[in-house]
Each structure stands twice: as C-alpha cells, then as structure tokens.
Amino acid sequence: MSMKKQWLLNIAMIILSWLTIPLLGRRTIKRFLPASLLAVLICSLDVPIGKKRRWWSFYNKPQSFIQNEFPFLIGPMLTMSLWILNWSYGNFKKFIMLNAIGEALFVSPITRLFTKLKLYKLVQFNEFQFFLYFFYKAFFLYGFQYLFEKYKKTKAY
C-alpha cells in the first residue's frame, strides 16, 4: 500500500470511529473516557515491545508509531472501549463477552483484510496470541472504571 493510501485509510479509520462518539452522549463520554484513555495508554506502552520483538510489521517505511499504530489506538480502540463500557458496565460477564467479540473481529477478519491490503502483517504472533495481546487489557479497563466509579462515590460524600 502506498504512503498516500495508508494516510487516507488512517484518516478514514479515525474519522469513521469518531463519528460514532456523539451518539454516546456527553455524560457517557465524560464517565467512561478516563478508562478508555488508560486502555489506549497501556497499548501505547506495549507498542515498542511489540515492534522490538517483531510481533507485527507494517509494510511502509519508515516504521513510525504516529503513522502506523497510533491511528488504530485513537480511532477504533478508543471508540470500541467507550462503546463496550457503555453497553456493559455493571455486568462483568457481558463486558468480557463483548470485549472478546470485538477483539476477535479485529484480530481475525480485519487483520486478514489489512494483510491483503499490505498495511500490516503478523510476524511472530499468530492470531490467538494477537487476540490475547489485546484481550488482557479488558481487565485493566474494567478494573480502572470500577475504581474510578468507587472514587467518585466516596468523593461525593
């Protein structure tokens, strides 16, 4: 994929993801944004490890975080975190199930599509390992949101 096409895809991915955010409502965004940003931050901290160990590889050079991984984090990952928390916070089983479905959709069909489009490919990871790489963050997301809600309740008194 050419650099120009990759930039267009990145911009489209971010814009399409962000277009769904106003549907959540201001209160929901304000409530779940801190936990969603934590999930993005944790992923951002994992990226250098993944690059160093060649868990995945982007086709275009140079290998820039801003050009390659960052659009996925601030686009689909951030919005998916917000939506999943909105739909399932308070029901841990539902939260884990929705997170597993969302991650499985990203890991299998979407990763295969992006590999065919020559955007990125999995190198040292298989699809199951890539799924686990994303899925473990769900526990941090839910745990942080739980602690955040608990803190807000105690602070209100």
Image (cartoon, grey):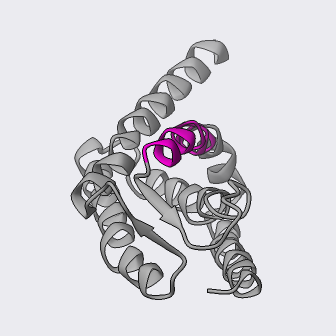
Q: Tell me which residue sits at (33%, 80%) in the image.
A: 109
Measuring from the top left, give residue 71's x and y in whole percent: 67, 64
Tell me if 4 is positioned left or right of 119 in this view. Answer: right
Highlighted range, magenta: 37-53
Quadrant of the image for the C terminus? top right
Q: Position of residue 13 (x, y in %)?
A: 64, 76
Q: In front: 132, or 147? A: 132
User: Is 132 located above or below residue 68 in the figure?
Assistant: above
Instruction: Look at the picture and state if 125 lies above or below 112.
Output: above
In which quadrant of the rendered view does residue 56 lie? Answer: bottom left
Q: Which quadrant of the view contains residue 8?
A: bottom right
Residue occupying image coordinates x 70% and y 57%:
64
Residues 63 and 87: in front is: 63
| Residue at the (68%, 75%) spot, across then down | 10
Q: Nearer the viewer, residue 6 or 17?
A: 6
Where in the figure is residue 61, as x and y percent of width and height? 68, 68
Identify which residue is drawn at 25% across, 56% down: 97
Q: Residue furthest front?
A: 61
Q: Is residue 127 above or below residue 132?
A: below
12 magenta-colored = no
Please provide percent x and percent y for residue 132. Answer: 29, 48
How many marks the image carries: the answer is: 0
Report the quarter where the N terminus lies. Answer: bottom right
Whether the magenta-drawn stretch holds residue 39 is answered as yes
Q: Main secondary structure of the magenta part?
A: helix
Q: Nearer the viewer, residue 155 or 135?
A: 135
